Amino acid sequence: MQGPDTLEVGKAAAGFQLTYLRTRQRSDTELEALAAQDVAAHDLDYMATGVIGLAYGVTDRLTLTAELPYTRRADLREGVALPAPGVEQLGDVSGFGDASLLAKYRIAGSNERGLALIGGIKLPTGSTRHFSTEGKLLEAEHQAGSGSWDAYLGAAAGTDLGRITLDASVLYQFTSTGAQQTRLGNRMQGGLALSHRFGADEHHHHGEGEDDHHHHGHSSWDLFGEATAEWEGRQNVSGVTEEETGGTALWLTAGARLNSASGFALTVAAGLPLSQDVRPSHAPGSYRVSLALAKAL
């Protein structure tokens, strides 16, 4: 999730984040049973996503960010009813996804805290021509890219309570029709995070991709916890809404961040779902872990 932080004018930061999501495995019998009910249910071993990003402070209040993901879906499977009940092995899908451009404008507060508005666009840069092991074009939802132009709109707020920081944010994605006449469901993510800083004398605050202690020659580390609510709407294919897609989930994540005096920030985190209401087209998540590295430039 994001805070309201913006970079100082002329400052830049680069980062990389790797996230591993393990799903709850469903048996072939379960997939076949869902297929018999005309539910195109899918399963996979895991999904790993790496994202590289670059942020630049246009002004003290406006930061622009560009991100490019690379995604791997391992051992993708699908239940089929015809010509006979069974499970089709679709194989692995890997590739660069759709790039995103985001703008964050801080409308209130100090340079590090306050309230910010977020807007942006997702570009159809990812591949939409991945095939299964048997040469079948995969459905749009399993491609590396969606083929659609999507819009983002959201907000972030934060405040310092001594060495404790409280952040909240929400980001909504408005999807459009892309590859194979498919409009993936709209998405929304919102969350609340608490963090505590150790090992430095300065007031607790940290910027997006920039270690504030870099300028003071101090290192520090943070412990944080966050609750994140995620919602995905139903997808539409050729004008037909697929009722068994989409769903909601609430995740609880805990982690630690090391902020070095040289301007590097290293973050590790692990999350578990507190509750999930995922429709049967997709398997719910079991757990996820992430590793992130950022550097002020």
Image (cartoon, rainbow, N blue to C red):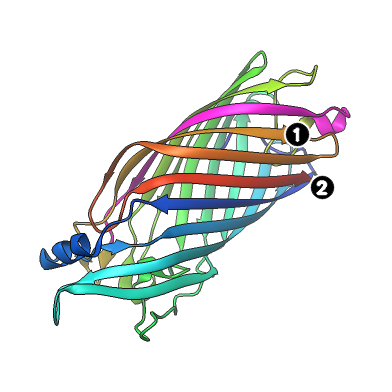
For this rendering, which residue is in front, 170 or 254? 254
Q: Which of labels 2 and 1 is toward the front?
A: 1
166 on left or right of 230: right
For this rendering, which residue is in front, 225 or 75? 75
Q: Name the secondary structure under disc 1.
A: strand
Residue that carries the numbered disc 1 in the rendered image: 259
Where does residue 114 sit, x and y in percent of width and height? 61, 25
* Displayed quadrant of residue 60: top right
Looking at the image, which residue is at 53% across and 28% down? 225
Q: Name the secondary structure under disc 2.
A: loop
Q: Does residue 225 belong to the magenta stretch?
A: yes
Mark 1 crowdedness (10 Å alpha carbons): few <14, some 14-19, many ≥20? many
Whether residue 76 is visible: yes
User: Which dot marks residue 297?
Assistant: 2
Q: Which residues are magenta?
A: 213-235
Mark 2 crowdedness (10 Å alpha carbons): few <14, some 14-19, many ≥20? some
